[in-house]
Image (spheres, rainbow, N blue to C red):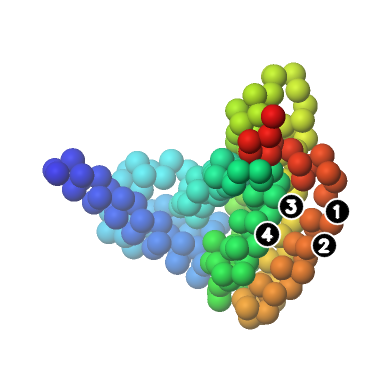
Amino acid sequence: MAEGLRERKKRETRQRISDIATGLFLEHGFVTVTIAEVAEAADVSVNTVYNYFPAKEDLFFDRSQGVVDRLSRWVRGRDEGESAARAVLRELRAEIEAVSPRMGLIEGYDRFMRCIDEAPPLRSRLWSIQQEVQDNLEATLREETGAEGGDPMPRLISGQICWVHGTVFVAIGREMAKGRNPDEVSREMLVLLDDIEELLGEKVLNYAVRGAP
């Protein structure tokens, strides 16, 4: 019980520091705000901030691990008879239909995107996260299909699936940056997703079908 309590307090402290930092970044800009200012606002030492967040960018993208793992989770959780790509398409539709904040469909998302656009370090970190997503998905596809190390298909398929995911995210970000209503953007993104699916070939749509011989 004592260990569980310590872990809970650590998670709460980490989240509080991240929330305070994000508020400062959105208000004053990522480049302008210093770690010392974050520490002062959170009433902790600078060392404490660095103990939880080794880099300043980690404060902004504090939930990046969930993003990195998302596509792999969806693929691993695909239904019997469902391919990797179709599982991702299904999950994306469900998230968009639900007007999920995880997809950026939330009031104020324009401030988040503006903060990234104005900060080269954040744009660089976002690119790195996108690469991690594809690398992670490729590893998952190799594991799920038993593909040999020299087989290029997992890399190619992961690239196509990441293109789908990334295209939708970019489109949502672009529209939400205009200050638009999330419900309206959600409806438009469902149409976009249908258009994207029509562009995918059979090899992509039928790769890594669960239960296939």
> Which amino acid type corresponds to the residue marked 4 in the rendered image?
Phe
Q: Nearer the viewer, mark 4 or mark 3?
A: 3
Give the residue at mark 4: 169
Residues at marks 4 and 3, CA–CA distance in whole angstroms: 9 Å
Give the residue at mark 3: 164
Residues at marks 3 and 1, CA–CA distance in whole angstroms: 10 Å
Give the residue at mark 2: 195
Counting from the top left corner in percent of width and height, residue 162 is at 70, 46
Q: Quadrant of residue 43?
A: bottom left
| Marker count (numbered) | 4
Q: Earlier in the sequence, mark 3 or mark 2?
A: 3
Q: Residue at x 65, y 62 (%)?
A: 93
Query: Which quarter of the rendered picture does the N terminus lie within?
Result: top left
Residues at marks 2 and 1, CA–CA distance in whole angstroms: 7 Å
Residue 208 is left or right of residue 37, and the answer is right
Counting from the top left corner in percent of width and height, residue 57 is at 52, 49
Q: Nearer the viewer, mark 1 or mark 4?
A: 1
Q: Quadrant of residue 38?
A: bottom left
Counting from the top left corner in percent of width and height, residue 199 is at 86, 53
Give the residue at mark 1: 199
